[in-house]
Image: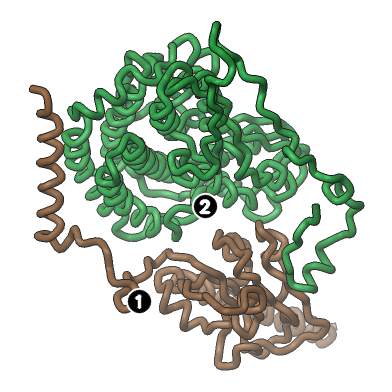
Amino acid sequence: MLGEGIIKGMAVTAKNFVGSYRDPERLTTVEYPEQRIPAKENARQFPFLVFDGDNPMAGLRCVACQICEKECPPQCIYIEKSKDKKPDHTGKPQFYPAIFDIDVSVCMSCQICVEVCPFEAIKMDTEFELSTEDRFGGLLLHREQLAKSVLHHRKIHPTEEAEIEARRVEERRKAEEKAKADAEAKAKAAAKKEAVPVQG
Amino acid sequence: MRIRTYPFHPAIASARRPSYPPRVTDIMETPANCGYEVQPKALPDGAPEGDLLEVSMGPHHPSTHGVFRMDVVLDGEQVVKLKPVFGYLHRNHEKIAENASYLASMPYTDRLDYFCSMTNNWAYALSVEKLAGLEVPERAQYIRVITAELTRLMNHTCLIGFLVQDMGALGTPLMYAFREREKILDLMESLSGSRMMCNYMRFGGCRCDLPAGWLEQARKVTDEFPKFLDEYEQLLTGNEILMARSQGVGVLPRGLAIKASITGPMLRACGVDYDLRKVDKYGIYDRFTFRVPLGDHGDVYDRLMVRLLEMRESVAILQQALKAVPEGPIVDPKAKLRGFRPKAGEAYGRIEAPKGELGFHLISDGGPNPYRYRVRPPSLINLTVLEDMCLGQNVADVVIILGSVDIVLGEVDR
């Protein structure tokens, strides 16, 4: 019958129309500023710099190795390495970024800086509401604005942070064992050296 | 013409910008017609001059799916001549990739066909793997197949939505398609962190492992999808208006399709059994049983139906793949993230993207960036037969013929 297909199609439309009122699962729209969909754990927006401890500038994990700057596809990172070394949160003297700027108007959220960083010093944030009146200066973020605590990263990416923490603990344990073994070997060698003249 | 420069950070500007000699555009006046001239009209026999009307459709026409222009010469309602004009979205993808490291052009491939970033990633990763001789672990192979087939579902549902919107079904089927796409986009986001610009695959595997519960979620979406397809088919395929509008319109002869190296659903709608998943068996496609739907007439309706049937096969592949995902590593341990330099050589990797054969041709001279990087975009090559399909058709049919080619301008212009 001519027109049968159209009637069938109308039935589908009617079913969907009624269903969208009846079934709460099908109400997919949320009232955005008041109501928010929680960010997915892997979600990525723009990078931030991780710091340990309480002092953002002293605790930055970044040692200004500039790998992310070289690998960044749209070249939105600018780093200037410090001339001197300052103690990091563990007290070990390290280089630090004298300037670390990210132009988030250029950044395309690809996460390559995060992947290539050997120090887990740069991570992706889930913050996306960055609108500002100053189009150029306001979107050029300096290291003071970029620094966020490791606790923030633990909050937004718990699984990843747990893995990193486990790896860091393991590395520290290995380093300590190695230091211990080295010290023992040194002590043994010293003892041997001392022992030789006594016998001779 | 003055070139507007972007106000970079002053330090970047001084450090990064060597002073180039003035460019051609600095010295020369740009010609008024931008170097492009409409060809003299080919008049049909006996037609008096002045009967023909030249219309420029686009570049901001809603039916062109982006910034694309067609210079159409009309005789009354019929198309006498059609000239596609593209390049409005050109952004130098190939040249940028030749100056960036291999890894750094992976996120740029997302932006080629911005509907199907996963398949773009796969094609690029495949050619680099061929170049560098990397092996992909089992688990990564399965993840790649799953993401690629999900992408195909996403692309085809939306394409059909856009196509029927071009025919005048204002929005309803498209909204249904977007509702289903949203579920797949959620999967993509929880997997890769981004909904559309996934940047997920890496040379020799994938970037990160599946998050907990992802497979169950994907299985749920896949199992519910046939229900939506039933609904979609009931809504569309039997509809008399759609049949009258699309059957026998924009016929592409089989011989021409083969000669013009058309690929993808457009070729299969002409009845040519050519699917790279069967022909090349790249990845692990030889392990799955699926059929390749073929059309008969090569018109707009066949192209629509081939895509609908293809989605059913994609669901079948997904169901097989989701059952069999093994445990294991996801990246080849030989693959290096930093300082990746494949040995000198040449490679061409191609996959069956939702739009057709997507290939990347790479030539390496042993350096950190490719010496030559070339994309074979299915959209552009499928677009070359647009005039042959449109000649003699009504001007309203040009819109749906273009819609049935399935182009994304990001890929056409690169």
Which residue position holds label 1? A33
Letter of the green chain: B
Q: Which residue is at the front of the view, B389 or B394?
A: B394
Tell me which residue sits at (39%, 27%) in the image: B397
Q: Which residue is at the front of the view, A49 or B384?
A: B384
User: Can I make out residue B215 in this image?
Assistant: no
Which mark, residue A83?
A: none
Tell me which residue sits at (33%, 30%) in the image: B307
Label 1 marks which chain's residue? A
* For residue A28, above or below residue B97: below
Decide if residue A108 is on the left or right side of residue B354: right
Task: Give the position of the C terminus of chain B as an image quadrant.
Answer: top right
Label 2 marks which chain's residue? B
Decide if residue B108 is on the left or right side of residue B13: left
Tell me which residue sits at (83%, 61%) in the image: B17
Decide if residue B140 is on the left or right side of residue B94: left
Question: Quarter of the image holding residue B401?
Answer: top left
* For residue A152, above or below residue B223: below
Task: Look at chain A in the picture and name its colour.
Answer: brown
Q: At which x and y percent is residue B236?
A: 22, 33
Which residue position holds label 2? B199
User: Can I make out residue B408 in this image?
Assistant: yes
Separation of residues labelled 2 and 1 (CA atoms): 28 Å
Question: Quarter of the image holding residue B164?
Answer: top left
Q: Which residue is at the front of the view, B17 or A117?
A: B17
Q: At which x and y percent is residue B16?
A: 81, 63
